[in-house]
Image (cartoon, rainbow, N blue to C red):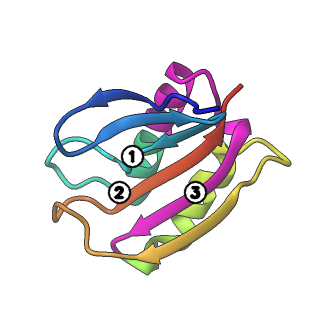
Amino acid sequence: MTQDIQRYHSNARMSKIVQYGGLVFLCGQTASGSAPTPIEDQTREVLRRIDTLLAEAGSDRSRLLSATIYLKHMEDFAAMNATWEAWMPSGAAPARTTVQANLASPDLLIEITVVAASA
């Protein structure tokens, strides 16, 4: 039996949400705007975007399976973690990887991509 792949907010390059086989895949989420803002503010904005997209896909943060976090500066790791931990429901931590990376814009400090189970 073949399952349908559903794609939302797609263009020639990417889809913001892809659903397949009970899983929800989100593209990498970053903060908006061109003005530099602190890592805590950017992390909160990214997590709000993730919440919005997961809700649209019929899931939520308590159903996260994995997360990959890209940081421009590893010096921001502790501050990002504090913001992440305040957002993450107790007992729902996903498998997670954090790496340092050059991001698409000089003002971006963080990008997060997640996979979640459908509700």
Judged left or right of residue 116, residue 49 is left
Give, as a single range, the part of the protein colored magenta: 47-72
Q: Quadrant of the N terminus?
A: top right
* Comes first in the chain, label 1 or label 2: 1
Q: Amino acid at mark 2?
A: Pro
Instruction: Give the labeled residue for mark 2.
Output: 38
What secondary structure is marked by label 3? strand
Residue 65 percent coordinates (x, y)? 69, 50
Q: Amino acid at mark 3?
A: Ala
Image point 64% across, 30% down: which residue?
60
What secondary structure is marked by label 1? loop
- The quarter of the displayed image where residue 101 is located: bottom left
- The quarter of the displayed image where residue 104 is located: bottom left
Residue 67's disc is 3
Up-down relation of residue 111 to residue 117 (above or below): below
Magenta span includes 11: no
* Comes first in the chain, label 3 or label 1: 1
Instruction: Give the labeled residue for mark 1.
Output: 27
Between the residue at mark 3 and the residue at mark 1, the CA separation in whole angstroms equals 11 Å
